[in-house]
Image (cartoon, helix red, strand yellow):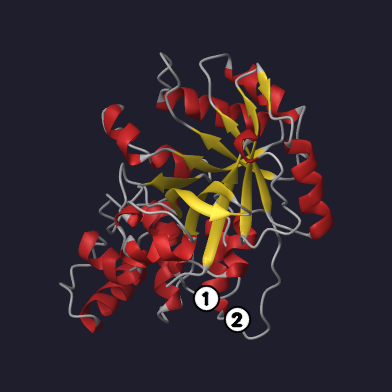
């Protein structure tokens, strides 16, 4: 079971000490629309820097101009920090996916990095179950939410909710959650606090939150090369040579829903080639699905009791990136 927990704090947690927090990382609300600034954010940001804590800002989306919202956020944060976009309805306002993408794109134009999007499953359903693959294309990771009953310690609530096999880890909209917000009732420093779980390592969480991790001296070179390729397209992975849940998730983000076969070219083919190299293929990662790539894929399929048809579809992907 994971032991990486991330908290979400806003003005409701006035007096919370980031400096002494036991959470692995912290999301702190900074802005909402162009009309609200959290008066406690600056203090939390300063505490995190002084105590070397992982902290990301977050912005609550409004229906106002995306460029104006991005500029408003930038004026109140350290722009070297990564951020999260909170996509939830507020009174009569119902945010759209287009508005979310517009804010993320506007932040990029302002030199800011939005690394996460909090879009609860229930609101995704209310939106009409749209395709969320545009998040991965922008290097943004989905955060889900599903709250079981219970209060008390985060560890106890998470375990009771099924832990690493709980409902909040299920993907939706062609996106797989990197974090699951599993409660808003955990007790922390005498307050009720939102808690999310993270399945990866501390190093992987650090990279997601913008901390550079060194490459281990004996890292698997093929996995590092794969991670570098995925990071060039916004994955935010630790280049540690370990093909873990986040690396597998990034592979799936590029290949899910596709049939990758001979004659195709492009990024999906590159990801397939780099992934096959992890299994010893020795391919040039040139993005061209030619005879050598077809043969390597057939060999992989045959070795794993799959139909050796040289087509990377759902069954093959499930073994390439479980």
Q: Position of residue 189 (x, y in %)?
A: 63, 54
Task: Judge by depth and name the residue closer to the eye, 261 or 65.
Answer: 65
Residue 286 shows up from this direction: no
Q: Quadrant of residue 60?
A: top right
Apparent side of residue 43 relative to residue 66 in the rendered image (left or right): right
Against 253, residue 162 (above or below) is below
Furthest residue to the bottom?
A: 218
Apparent side of residue 216 relative to residue 98 in the rendered image (left or right): right
Q: Secondary structure at mark 2?
A: loop
On-image quarter of the N terminus:
bottom left
Quickly name the residue at label 2. 219
Residue at x 27%, y 49% (from the top left corner): 257
Alpha carbons under labels 1 and 2: distance apart:
7 Å
* Mark 1 Cα-neighbour bin, 10 Å: few <14, some 14–19, many ≥20: some
Against 146, residue 314 (above or below) is below
Quickly name the residue at label 1. 242
Q: Secondary structure at mark 1?
A: loop
On-image quarter of the C terminus:
bottom left
Q: Quadrant of residue 318?
A: bottom left
Apparent side of residue 279 relative to residue 45 in the rendered image (left or right): left
Q: Are marks 1 and 2 in contact (CB under 8 Å)?
A: yes
């Amino acid at each position: 079971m994971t032991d990486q927990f991330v908290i979400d704090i806003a003005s409701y947690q006035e007096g919370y000490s980031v400096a002494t927090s036991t959470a692995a990382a912290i999301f702190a609300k900074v802005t909402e629309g162009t009309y609200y600034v959290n008066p406690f954010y600056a203090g939390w940001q300063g505490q995190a820097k002084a105590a070397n804590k992982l902290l990301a800002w977050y912005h609550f989306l409004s229906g106002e101009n995306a460029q104006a919202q991005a500029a408003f956020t930038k004026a109140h944060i350290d722009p070297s920090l990564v951020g999260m976009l909170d996509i939830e309805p507020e009174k009569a306002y119902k945010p759209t996916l287009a508005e979310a993408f517009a804010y993320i794109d506007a932040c990029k134009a302002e030199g800011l990095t939005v690394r996460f999007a909090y879009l609860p499953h229930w609101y995704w359903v209310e939106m009409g179950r749209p395709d969320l693959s545009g998040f991965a294309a922008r290097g943004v990771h989905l955060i889900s939410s599903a709250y079981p009953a219970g209060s008390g310690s985060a560890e106890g609530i998470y375990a009771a909710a099924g832990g690493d096999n709980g409902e909040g880890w299920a993907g939706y909209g062609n996106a797989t959650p990197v974090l699951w917000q599993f409660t808003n009732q955990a007790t922390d420093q005498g307050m009720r606090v939102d808690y999310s779980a993270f399945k990866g390592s501390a190093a992987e969480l650090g990279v997601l939150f913008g901390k550079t991790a060194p490459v281990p001296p004996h890292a698997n070179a093929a996995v590092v090369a794969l991670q570098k390729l995925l990071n060039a397209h916004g994955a935010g992975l630790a280049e540690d040579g370990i093909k873990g849940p986040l690396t597998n998730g990034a592979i799936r983000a590029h290949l899910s829903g596709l049939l990758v076969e001979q004659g195709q070219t492009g990024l999906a083919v590159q990801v397939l080639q780099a992934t096959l190299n992890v299994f010893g293929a020795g391919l040039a990662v040139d993005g061209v699905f030619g005879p050598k790539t077809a043969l390597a894929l057939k060999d992989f399929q045959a070795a794993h009791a799959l139909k050796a048809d040289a087509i990377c579809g759902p069954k093959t992907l499930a073994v390439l990136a479980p």
